[in-house]
Image (cartoon, grey):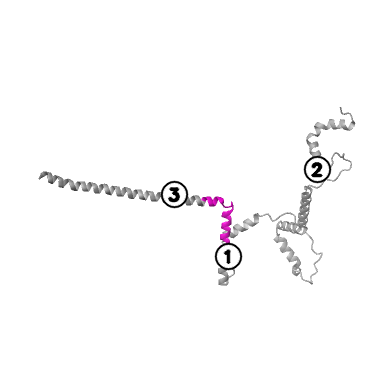
Amino acid sequence: MASCSEESATAPEEEQTETLASQKREARLRKFRELHFKRNEARKLNHQEVVEEDKRLKLPANWEAKKARLEWELAEDEKKKECAARGEDYHRVKLLEITADDAERWERKKKKKNPDTGFAGYAEAQFRQYQRLTKQIRPDMESYEKQREECGEDFHPTSNSLIHGTHVPSKEGIDRMVEDVEKQIEKRAKYSRRRAYNDDADIDYINERNAKFNKKAERFYGKYTAEIKQNLERGTAV
């Protein structure tokens, strides 16, 4: 009777042990399947990143700038259409959206640009000279008020006003003009001019390019070859 009771007691223990073992095995398999799924997902994402990186490397160097520019143009077109649909002026709406800081920054950027693009014609050069000179003018309000009192109604002349020849420039104004003219003369004197041809100079060249080369050679090696040149000219060279 004791042996039967012992066998009946060990049976539930074995079943419990087998249940725990199966549960552990299922948990491990589940964990393995999860890891396998995560590995496949990581492999897929890595492959996608590699493909995207390869596409980016094959694009032009300025692709990002072009893309941003195209997106901005599309957005601007949409805004224009919306303003047209509402019957509003697009440029007016755009100006209302600009902040004071942005406006000041753009003005500073404009001032930094050099308006002088080089000689394009005498009219353009004269206009740039006029702008340069007018920017240097500083208004003298005292002289302005004094002249207005002296001229009276003729300060704002009409077709019936006779003020020709009545204006006398001040000594300070004449001095400023003289100083500016002297500065212009000094500036012009610094320009490189084409040197006049000297008829009395020795001709030791065959063309203009050879003449420049001979001048450079003379400048660097003239003191070493002066005696040889003199002997050749006298006919006493050995």
Which quadrant of the figure contains the C terminus? top right
Q: Which residue type does callout 1 highlight?
A: Asp
Task: Kindly identify the residue that appears in the image at 81 percent across and 41 percent down.
Answer: 210
Mark 1 secondary-structure assignment: helix
Q: Which residue type does callout 3 highlight?
A: Arg
| Marked residue nearer the N-terminal end (1 or 2) | 1
Please state the extent of the stretch shown in magenta in the rendering: 53-79
Q: Position of residue 112 (x, y in %)?
A: 65, 54
In this rendering, the label closer to the viewer, 2 or 3: 3
- Distance between mark 2 and mark 3 Cα atoms: 69 Å
| Residue sitting nearer the eye, 120 or 45 | 45
**Tag on residue 43?**
3
Task: Kindly identify the residue that appears in the image at 27 percent across and 49 percent down.
Answer: 23
Relative side of 54 to 162, left or right: left
Q: Which residue is mark 1?
A: 77
Relative side of 175 to 49, left or right: right
Mark 3 secondary-structure assignment: helix
The answer to whether the residues at label 2 and label 3 have Cβ atoms under 8 Å apart is no
Which quadrant of the figure contains the N terminus? top left
In this rendering, the label closer to the viewer, 3 or 1: 3
| Marked residue nearer the N-terminal end (3 or 1) | 3
- Distance between mark 3 and mark 1 Cα atoms: 42 Å
Q: Position of residue 188 (x, y in %)?
A: 78, 50
Q: Which residue is mark 2?
A: 209
- Distance between mark 1 and mark 2 Cα atoms: 58 Å
Q: What secondary structure predominates along the stretch shown in magenta? A: helix
Is residue 77 rendered magenta in the image? yes
Is residue 192 rendered magenta in the image? no
Query: Local crowd at mark 1 within 10 Å, few (<14), some, or many (≥20)?
Result: few
